[in-house]
Amino acid sequence: MSITIEQIRSDFPILKKEIEGKPLVYFDNAATTQKPRQVIDSVNEYYRLHNSNVHRGVHLLSRQATISFEETRKKLAAFLNAAHDYEIIFTRGTTESVNLVAYTYGEANIHEGDEVIVSGLEHHSNLVPWQQLCFRKRAKLRVIPVLDNGELDLASYTALLNERTRLVAVNHISNTLGTINPVREITRLAHEYGAVVVIDGAQALSHGPVDVRDIDCDFYAFSAHKTYGPMGIGGLYGKEELLEKMPPFHFGGEMIETVSFEKTVFNKLPYKFEAGTPNVADAIAFGAAVDYISNLGWDTIRQQENLLLEYGTEKLLQVEGLKIIGTASHKASIISFLLDNIHFYDAGSVIDHFGIAVRTGNHCTQPLMARFGIQGTIRASFSFYNTTAEIDRLVEAINKVKELFA
Ligand code: PMP
């Protein structure tokens, strides 16, 4: 790496924080990533210097806000390799993006007797909207089973596909196990049956390049806050021809072309799906996050995260009585584990006293926990700003947990 880890860390003010006199170790990056100075400054600067509503006024501030807002859309389109800027719709995040597709495409195209496929690895955000749609429509929800190593059972997936399959919704990377799913292959197979594919990219955007045209998915949902950007903003990529045919999600200002009491003509893409005043400040700061990642470069990010995954896996496996759940051959830097005879909440609380933030619980994947016959796990998820020395501190803390509960 030409840039040092210290230089990278100095961009993230929160990493200087101390917890109970110990430097913070932040290993909850799959829940949300920390924000670099550039992103924080962007939000601050927007409200101090540029605050104005977009697409409305002809005055300078509004024109500037609109340009910066649309600039982020362009950056995101390039980041995801979308064919057009207007295929990127701003939402509050992955959850809202998935709901958008379920309530618009889903309501219009899923009918009684149709089948929707999800995977056993899904976050509730990419499961419950489809389950509820199926209830409303009397459609059938089918589930791709998960193998013991946390990979999807692709043979079973192939067997599930049939002429009634209308939609397949899977995540790109599992937030709980770190499994990187073969989304290109999953999409190719779904398309053979004419089914549309929704990818939940919440975890993927921060770990490596995403190319929606290469994957050929129909929709791709993401959240800024998991990608070093602010909370409350995210997006949905959708193929133009599908977005054009879909009805709007929310109705109101912005999404209209003309309104009379008799009828409303909807706005063109992407505004048709962006009713109301958007989260302008955070959208612009999302653009700053994309710039930050692009400047750092995927090589640097992947090198550090792969190192942490390898080092973390090796060190954790040396702890007696520790079991890693999720050992897929392609994994992101996320490690879920359990300690023999020690409840994950107890372990998490003690680890917290060491100033180390790990996530404990079911990670919004209750069916996946049921698949493994467990209630939850302890999850350490690493970012490029983490270090092997921090992993050593985690291992030390785990050994203390074991002593305490021996
Ligand atoms: N899908 C996955 C895989 C996730 O990890 C998350 C967040 N934990 C979500 C969806 C939901 O994202 P958000 O809360 O930002 O809408």
Image (spheres, rainbow, N blue to C red):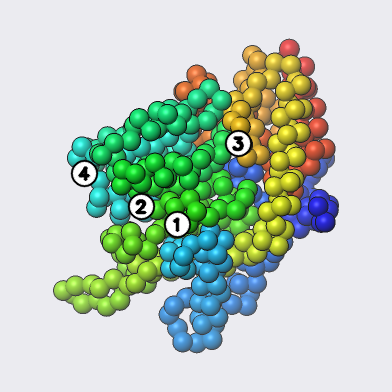
Give the distance between the C-alpha atoms of the residues marked 4 and 1, in whole angstroms. Answer: 23 Å
Of label 2 and label 3, which has the lower sequence position?
2
Q: Which residue is mark 3?
A: 330
**Which of labels 3 and 4 is toward the front?**
3
Q: Secondary structure at mark 1?
A: strand
Q: Which mark is residue 111?
A: 4
Q: What amino acid is labelled 2 in the image?
A: Val
- Mark 4 residue element: loop
Would you name the residue on which mark 1 appears? 236
Q: Nearer the N terminus, badge 4 or badge 1?
A: 4
Residue 306's quadrant in the figure?
top right
Which image quadrant is residue 237 in? bottom left
- Position in image of residue 404 (x %, y %): 75, 17
Q: Residue 92, can we see it?
A: no
Tell me if label 1 and label 2 are in contact, CB under 8 Å.
yes
* Residue identifier under label 2: 101
Q: Quadrant of residue 71?
A: bottom right
